[in-house]
Amino acid sequence: MNNISPYITAGSSIYMKQRTEPLSIFPKMILGSSGFDGGHLMLDTVERENILIDFPEAEKFIRTFYSAEDFLNGSLRYCIWIEDNLLNEALKIKPLFDRINK
């Protein structure tokens, strides 16, 4: 009997059994990528642009941020992302300093 496999090629049918335990040794993920900063390190497009108008040097500290909801709704957000070794440089930029202190 001819079948189409999950790889869209000729092959046999594959049946997956329901599992109640993970396949890996990693701990169970409760929450994905999420910030717990009260939203102070998240920026919308307008906030990002307002910071960059006065402080173009802040661009290196602002990254695009996508959640599943952003992706599905086509929205765009940003986050302030500072490597430990660049903290002193970031703190010299007033809007970043203010948000970090919140």
Image: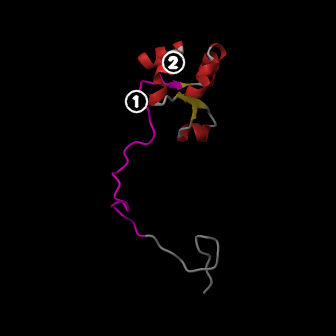
Task: Kindly identify the residue that appears in the image at 58 percent across and 70 percent down.
Answer: 6
Q: Which residue is nearer to you in this view: 5 or 64? A: 64
Q: Which residue is mark 1?
A: 36
Q: Are marks 1 and 2 in contact (CB under 8 Å)?
A: no
Task: Kindly identify the residue that appears in the image at 47 percent across and 73 percent down.
Answer: 15
Query: Relative to 24, is 75 above or below?
Result: above
Query: Relative to 31, is 6 above or below?
Result: below
Could you say where residue 7 lies in the image, as x and y percent from the top left? 61, 70
Q: Which residue is nearer to you in this view: 41 or 69? A: 41
Could you say where residue 57 lies in the image, as x and y percent from the top left? 61, 20
Residue 9 showing in the rendered view: yes
Could you say whether the residue bearing mark 2 is in a helix, strand or loop? helix
Sequence-first tag of 1 and 2: 1
- The colour scheme applied to this rendered structure is secondary structure
Residue 102 showing in the rendered view: no
Q: Which residues are magenta?
A: 17-42
Residue type marked 2: Leu
Residue type marked 1: Phe
From the image, state whether disc 1 or disc 2 is nearer to you: 2
Q: Is residue 88 magenta?
A: no
Q: Which residue is mark 2?
A: 96
Q: Which residue is nearer to you in this view: 63 or 78? A: 63
Give the number of the disc on residue 24: none
Q: Is residue 23 magenta?
A: yes
Separation of marks 1 and 2 at Cα, in angstroms: 17 Å
Looking at the rendered structure, the number of numbered marks drawn on it comes to 2
User: Residue 58 falls in which quadrant of the image?
Assistant: top right
Q: Residues within 10 Å of mark 2 (few under 14, many from 20)?
A: many
- Quadrant of the frame with the C terminus: top left
Task: Kindly identify the residue that appears in the image at 59 percent across and 74 percent down.
Answer: 5
Assign the magenta stretch its main secondary structure: loop
